[in-house]
Image (spheres, rainbow, N blue to C red):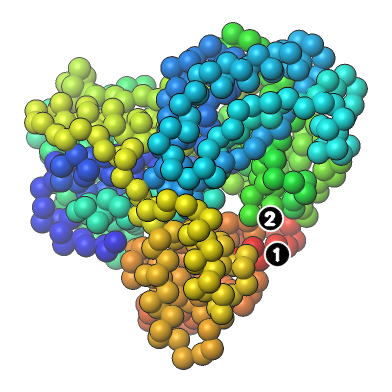
């Protein structure tokens, strides 16, 4: 995956995709698979904003039962199965436990019915998955005693048992986006990060492409395209603001926040715990009055989310004040007192902006529940499509419809969609356990087993390409050698430009908290050598990375470092 600006400026593409998050990556992959010539530009780094703010859960849509939205359930079930099939190294089954209380909507009887309906709606959930380890089992209920054994300290007042079902979890959401982009570039996609769209090329009512500015060199050039698909997420209003004439009303957004904490449980279940705060989903047919807090095990930590708040600022200035994090901690502790979380237990704060259905603040944030694909021909503008996505899980499905719209706009024909059947980069694995065992045997002289597992999960069958960079290391092989090889691979094959790109979105060593100083220095030294950084540049990059763990208060978390969780 190379950053070829000359090719971008000298080619007229069928489709130019704006935005390199999960939706942009899926659209680009879908379009290139179907025979279109495609370019993609991202103003920052790939998967560097909302797509990185994730509970890492690939939902099968059980929650849509309260809306009786079986169509969305079927879409989610299919997409969950598809992701486990095309990216088995990154997407794995996740057991979920929800305590049941009383005999109403939160009771064991209601949940038993819900699980039965879910199993019926998802009867083909394991169809076509060759690896039985990737299969989603049927839901079941457990007794109150067993529920308390699994979740010590849970309130027993009115507890009638627990409901267990399975979803899936993505090990590294950023690398899943990269897998889509790498797969697409192998088929001819021209992609580049740090290219910001600064204007549209217009001829009357027709879009002919976009003007972009390279954030690394400040040079500006044009990219010609017959159709533009805008997947810029929270920047959609800014991108549309570049047009000669105003279009639709601005899309409102809400702030979503998840936190990474010390492990709150010693088991593999994700758990849903009812918040004590009142919440009403105005669109739900069955209203629970309290929302579920979701606590998922992830790489030795707990991921807790999601809390939402109204947001009216610019997406480039997104921040989360310490008091908002503290309020969320208080809500978690109130819902599950044994957690006893403090700010010192928060290793990382994920935040992003999601589309809201509200134009004015109300007591509860109401998120948009349906994706939107906007073709502006009815408003007198040809050659532009905007995609507003709502779920990470269903991005591939939305991409199919977006590319269908582009094909129609182009007045051409294209191949049928193949994206559900082609393994993504690193994902050609029939049996995950066998793959991991072979990988451990190959790498056991280099690092400990947890580090090797992280490495194999991140890269899948592409890991030998990373290991080729080990040959240039004259020192005895070690986990530091493996990290250095990952940095070299990120620079040469994954378009990493900054230390943040490497730490957060290539190696994943900063996904939960500040890595050990030795890991950061290994990354910095490798990048200094390859990119010919001056020491001042290296220190600036290091300062920028460390600032990611500091919120609005300079003393937040006191510069706390989390235990390094492998590569």
For residue 29, say whether it is visible: yes
Q: CA distance from mark 2 to mark 1?
A: 10 Å
* For residue 180, above or below residue 248: below
- Residue 360 image point, x, y percent: 54, 19
Q: Residues within 10 Å of mark 1 (few under 14, many from 20)?
A: some
Q: Quadrant of residue 498?
A: bottom left
- Which mark identifies residue 563? 1
The reply to whether the C-beta atoms of the residues labelled 2 and 1 are less than 8 Å apart is yes
At mark 1, the secondary structure is loop
Q: Quadrant of residue 273?
A: top right
Q: Nearer the viewer, residue 262 or 8?
A: 262
Quadrant that contains the N terminus: bottom left
For residue 238, say whether it is visible: no
- Which mark identifies residue 492? none
Q: Nearer the viewer, residue 231 or 292?
A: 292
In the shown orientation, is residue 147 left or right of residue 241? Answer: right
| Residue identifier under label 2 | 300
In the shown orientation, is residue 334 left or right of residue 413? Answer: right
* For residue 71, above or below residue 434: above
Identify the residue at image location x=68%, y=55%: 300
In the shown orientation, is residue 112 left or right of residue 230? Answer: right
At mark 2, the secondary structure is loop
Sequence-earlier tag: 2 or 1: 2
Identify the residue at image location x=29%, y=24%: 374
- Residue 42 image point, x, y percent: 33, 50
């Amino acid at each position: 995956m190379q950053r070829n600006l000359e090719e971008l400026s000298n080619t007229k593409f069928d489709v130019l995709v704006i935005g390199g998050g999960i939706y942009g990556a899926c659209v680009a992959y879908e379009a290139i698979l179907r025979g279109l010539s495609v370019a993609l530009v991202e103003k920052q780094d790939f998967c560097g904003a909302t797509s990185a703010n994730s509970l890492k859960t690939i939902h099968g849509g059980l929650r849509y039962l309260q809306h009786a939205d079986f169509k969305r359930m079927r879409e989610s079930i299919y997409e969950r199965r598809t992701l486990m099939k095309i990216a088995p190294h990154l997407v794995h089954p996740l057991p979920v436990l929800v305590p049941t209380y009383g005999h109403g909507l939160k009771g064991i009887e209601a949940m038993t019915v819900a699980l039965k309906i879910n199993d019926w709606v998802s009867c083909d959930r394991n169809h076509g998955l060759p690896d039985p380890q990737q299969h989603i089992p049927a839901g079941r209920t457990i007794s109150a005693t067993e529920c308390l054994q699994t979740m010590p300290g849970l309130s027993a007042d009115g507890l009638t048992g627990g409901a267990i079902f399975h979803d899936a979890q993505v090990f590294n959401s950023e690398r899943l986006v990269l897998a889509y982009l790498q797969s697409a570039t192998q088929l001819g996609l021209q992609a580049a990060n740090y290219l910001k769209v600064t204007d549209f090329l217009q001829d009357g009512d027709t879009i002919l492409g976009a003007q972009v500015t390279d954030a690394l060199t400040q040079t500006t050039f044009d990219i010609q395209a017959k159709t533009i698909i805008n997947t810029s997420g929270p920047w959609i209003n800014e991108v549309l603001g570049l047009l000669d004439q105003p279009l639709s009303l601005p899309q409102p957004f809400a702030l979503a926040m998840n936190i990474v904490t010390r492990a709150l449980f010693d088991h593999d279940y994700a758990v849903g715990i009812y918040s004590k705060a009142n919440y009403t989903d105005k669109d739900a047919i069955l209203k629970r009055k309290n929302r579920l807090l979701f606590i998922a095990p992830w790489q030795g930590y707990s991921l807790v989310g999601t809390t939402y708040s109204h947001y009216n600022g610019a997406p480039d200035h997104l921040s989360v004040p310490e008091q908002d994090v503290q309020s969320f901690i208080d809500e978690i502790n109130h819902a599950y007192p044994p957690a006893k979380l403090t700010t010192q237990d928060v290793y990382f704060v994920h935040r992003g902006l999601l589309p809201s259905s509200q134009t004015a603040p109300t007591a509860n944030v109401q998120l948009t529940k349906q994706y939107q694909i906007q073709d502006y021909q009815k408003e007198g503008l040809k050659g532009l499509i905007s995609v507003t996505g709502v779920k990470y899980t269903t991005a591939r499905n939305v991409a199919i419809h977006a590319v269908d719209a582009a094909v129609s706009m182009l007045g051409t024909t294209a191949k049928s969609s193949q994206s559900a059947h082609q393994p993504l980069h690193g994902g050609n694995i029939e049996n995950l356990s066998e793959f991991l065992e072979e990988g451990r045997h190959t790498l056991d002289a280099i690092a400990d087993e947890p580090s090797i597992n992280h490495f194999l999960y991140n890269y899948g069958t592409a890991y030998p390409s990373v290991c080729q960079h080990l040959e240039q290391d004259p020192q005895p092989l070690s986990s530091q050698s493996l990290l250095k090889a990952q940095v070299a691979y990120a620079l040469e094959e994954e378009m990493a430009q900054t230390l943040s790109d490497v730490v957060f979105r290539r190696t994943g060593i900063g996904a939960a908290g500040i890595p050990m100083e030795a890991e950061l220095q290994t990354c910095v030294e490798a990048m200094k050598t390859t990119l010919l950084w001056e020491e001042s540049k290296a220190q600036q990059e290091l300062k920028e990375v460390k600032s990611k763990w500091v919120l609005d208060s300079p003393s937040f978390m006191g510069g706390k470092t989390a235990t390094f969780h492998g590569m």
